[in-house]
Image (cartoon, coloured by chain):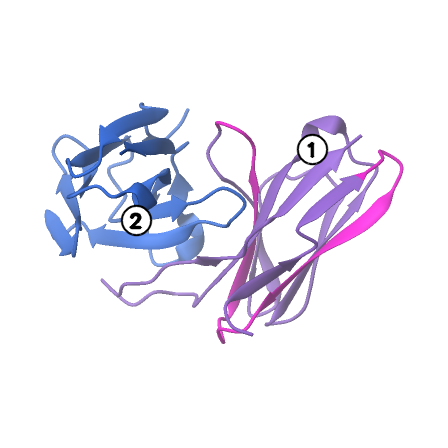
Chain colours: A purple, B blue
Amino acid sequence: ETGVTQTPRHLVMGMTNKKSLKCEQHLGHNAMYWYKQSAKKPLELMFVYSLEERVENNSVPSRFSPECPNSSHLFLHLHTLQPEDSALYLCASSQDGRAEWENTEAFFGQGTRLTVV
Amino acid sequence: DQQVKQNSPSLSVQEGRISILNCDYTNSMFDYFLWYKKYPAEGPTFLISISSIKDKNEDGRFTVFLNKSAKHLSLHIVPSQPGDSAVYFCAASAGDSNYQLIWGAGTKLIIKP
């Protein structure tokens, strides 16, 4: 399998549940990202891992907990979420540290559509 | 305060005509700009990019124009095809790291037959 794969594609969870989103990349990249996409809003960067170390946490509530066990896998652990957390959660990967003018971009998974009830 | 703005939430264009998607930015430190395309139920896919040393980059039917003085870029698609119907995101980067990408809210492009 190639590219960035996310599972599950759809998830419905109650506010007291604990669930995890999984992301796997087969591109040999060394940076992975979690984004949140809400309707009619810009993509919101949540977490960045570079070389398996968390390098950015954009003021994300603690009910979201990322984990990066190796450079190919990224998890987002969810617990006690709120209905406003319902959104599309996208994972992406890239080769960190672009050279000057190098054409680099992030490759995205298909996302997990999360509904909190 | 949004640093990258796509002021048109949607755009409808006749098949075969030119589609022009616009993006404005406020941060003069941005030096690299990207366009992504997103179909429903899929993640965004990279379309085309431009660095600030250029004012135009062309790839097949897609051309991106950058006007640094106006802090404005646009994506031209010509001729527009039904498969181009999607949401288009503009993103900007400052510095050497990809995780500085700042995204616009997207413009939904509808190509009419």
**Label of residue A85 in the image:** 1
Whether residue A78 appears in this view of the structure is yes
Across and down, in percent, residue A15 comes to 84, 33
Residue farthest to the front? B113
Marks 1 and 2: same chain?
no
Is A34 part of what is drawn in magenta?
A: yes
Q: Which amino acid does label 2 sit on?
A: Leu
Q: Give the range drawn in magenta.
A: A13-40
Q: Is mark 2 on a helix, strand or loop?
A: strand
Callout 1, which amino acid?
Answer: Asp
Name the residue tied to disc 2: B34
Residue at mark 1: chain? A
User: Which residue sits at x=40%, y=39%?
Assistant: B103
**Image mark count:** 2
Quadrant the N terminus of chain B occupies: top left
- Spatial CA distance of label 1 from label 2 is 27 Å
Q: Which quarter of the picture shows residue B29?
A: top left
Q: Which residue is drawn at 37% across and 46% down?
A: B37
Residue ID at (68%, 33%):
A86
Q: Please name whichever residue, A82 or B98, is drawn nearer the observer in this view of the structure.
A: A82
Residue B110 colored in magenta in the image: no
